Image: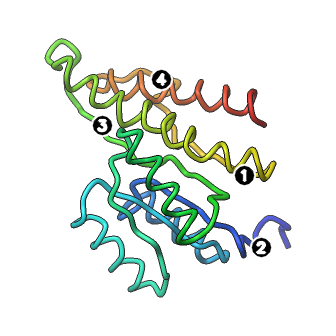
Amino acid sequence: MNQFLNFSLEGKVALVTGASYGIGFAIASAFAEQGATVCFNDINQELVDKGMAAYAEKGIKAHGYVCDVTDEPAVQAMVATIAKEVGTIDILVNNAGIIRRVPMHEMDAADFRRVIDIDLNAPFIVAKAVLPAMMEKRAGKIINICSMMSELGRETVSAYAAAKGGLKMLTRNICSEYG
């Protein structure tokens, strides 16, 4: 039997950003199945409520928070609230992200900036918020969701590819600086 198939996250607190649905929901659900206490955020109450209902349907007691991950003071406040209500974050998955499929010559700079803000700046902001407690504990995991677009350019995804390429390098830097 593969030794990596069974592992325990008992006693661990995991924050998965943008995990009301999709990949983030699947990751958070898998963590919960291994015993982690799951925390997630989304941009508005409606999405958090939908996420809470989906977790409850799977029998998972999740903790949902409304938080815009591009808003540094809001992220700092969310991380402090999680620490107070649930416990120190042991695992961060920077999952929240968007994509705009527009040919580069037709994309507004504001749309480009929005993708960069959510897909690159937000993981920096959230990682920065959880690092002090991880450094104090001398333990923790930060997982940034990248994409094949961090390696390959494709038509209509210039902002997304730029953000994911930057996120790949941010991840390497976090490993180098804090690993």
Residue 147 is at least partly visible in this image: no
Which residue lies most toward the top here?
Answer: 105
- The amino acid type of the residue labelled 2 equals Asn
In percent of width and height, residue 52 lies at 36, 76
| 146 sits left or right of 153 in the view | right
- Badge 1 is on which residue? 140
Q: Name above or below for residue 156 compared with residue 146.
A: above
The image's mark for residue 6 is 2
Q: Looking at the image, can residue 100 be seen?
A: yes
Q: Disc 1 versus disc 4: distance between alpha carbons?
A: 30 Å
- Mark 4: which secondary structure? loop
Choose the circle earlier in sequence order: 3 or 4: 3
Q: Which residue is mark 4?
A: 152
Q: Is residue 39 above or below residue 114?
A: below
**Number of residue marks:** 4
Mark 4 and mark 1 in contact (Cβ < 8 Å)? no
Where 13 falls versus 93 (above or below)? Answer: below
Cα distance, mark 4 to mark 2?
34 Å
Q: Residue 97: which quarter of the image?
A: top left
Real-space Cα separation, disc 1 to disc 2, in angstroms: 19 Å
Q: Relative to the observer, which residue lies in front, 23 or 88?
A: 88
